[in-house]
Image (cartoon, rainbow, N blue to C red):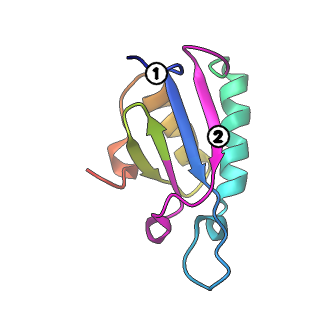
Amino acid sequence: MSSYYKHHVFFCLNQRDDGKACCADHNAKAMQEYAKKRCKELGIAGAEGRVRINKAGCLNRCELGPVLVVYPEAVWYTFVDEQDIDEIIDSHLIHGKPVERLMVDR
């Protein structure tokens, strides 16, 4: 069985109220919005066989955050800024080569 999307990307946007680390404290929402906009600009966003950028609730890895995960490969990333997001989009989503320096699990 193949994936509907070539790549399905989930950004953790969780906000914790108990003071524990969370992705929302690290600009995750702005980076998710940027990734979505950038994929549209590049013409890779959309329906079947393309890239889908989604928001997610807690992915239970906030201590490593901010985090995103790319399926179907199940590659987990952390990121700091738009340059990191651009690198993930270009290297992984367009060229199929995961960005090792940003991977959470290696």
* Dot in front, 1 or 2: 1
Residue 55 lies in the magenta stretch: yes
Which mark, residue 78?
A: none
Image vertical order of residue 102 relative to residue 14, above or below: above
Read off the magenta span.
Answer: 46-68
**Residue 44 at x, y percent in the picture:** 62, 19
Residue sitting nearer the eye, 95 or 49:
49
Q: Return the disc, 1 or 2, that comes first in the chain's sequence.
A: 1
Q: Which residue is mark 1?
A: 3
**Residue 85 at x, y percent in the picture:** 56, 43
**Residue 36 at x, y percent in the picture:** 69, 35
Q: Which residue is mark 2?
A: 54
In the image, what residue occupies the spot 66% across and 21% down?
Answer: 42
In the rendered structure, which amino acid carries the disc numbered 1?
A: Ser
In the image, what residue occupies the spot 25% across and 50% down?
Answer: 106
Task: Specify whether 18 is left or right of 72.
Answer: right
